[in-house]
Image (cartoon, rainbow, N blue to C red):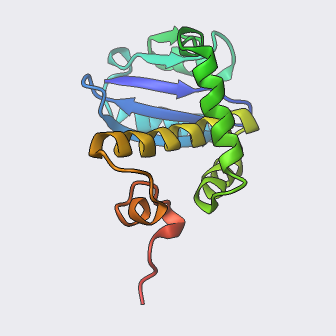
Amino acid sequence: MFIGWDWATETHDVTVMDPFGKRIDRWELARTEEGFAKTLARLRRHGDPADLPVAIETTRGMAVDRLLAAGHPVESRTVSFRFATNRRARVALTTFADNSRHGSDWAARTYNDARARKKRHPHAVRILARAWLRVMWACWRDGTCYDPAIHHANSKINTPADEPLAA
């Protein structure tokens, strides 16, 4: 098992993955003592802390201190994938995603949901870009052109707000 910890100013995102990369568990926690206590207890359900390495973007702070005190091996990783990619392609994709939120209700909802979860604008745009990549991948894989009606019907771009309400 592996733990990925997305460090942020107000809230953190924690993801537990198995050795094959399948997501086992994911949650958001507030930067409070209660939030850390609940998270450490939740992590203990997945195994012994010594066997659950945590990859986190920082080397300091309350999160790292609590993880080390609980016995988790901590690996500090910077978000280096951004530097290993084609910068022009990355900028083109994030610019497309940012502009799409002005013309697409789905894109606006995806962006606004990320902002409501206290993500800053650049992070929210990357979340939207990742969602668009999933749609583009589905189009390429299936050999189809993008059609919002088809992709909504096939749950390619559905969000919880799109779910029908029970009568």
Residue at 69% across, 34% down:
95
**Image quarter in which the N terminus is found:** top left
Q: Residue furthest bottom?
A: 167
76 relative to 62 in the view: left or right: left
**Image quarter in which the C terminus is found:** bottom left
On screen, residue 150 above or below 44: below
Residue at 56% across, 35% down:
13
72 relative to 121 in the view: left or right: left
Give the image quarter of residue 121. top right
Give the image quarter of residue 11. top right
Residue 32 placement (x, y as % from top left)? 68, 37
Q: Nearer the viewer, residue 156 or 150?
A: 150
Numbered-mark total: 0
Residue 139 placement (x, y as % from top left)? 37, 45
Residue at 74% across, 37% down:
120
For the question of whether residue 65 can be seen, the reply is no
Residue 71 placement (x, y as % from top left)? 45, 15
43 relative to 67 in the view: left or right: left
On screen, residue 74 above or below 31: above
On screen, residue 96 above or below 70: below
Q: Nearer the viewer, residue 32 or 83?
A: 83
84 relative to 154 in the view: left or right: right
Q: Nearer the viewer, residue 104 or 161?
A: 104
For the question of whether residue 38 can be seen, the reply is yes
Residue at 50% across, 43% down:
131
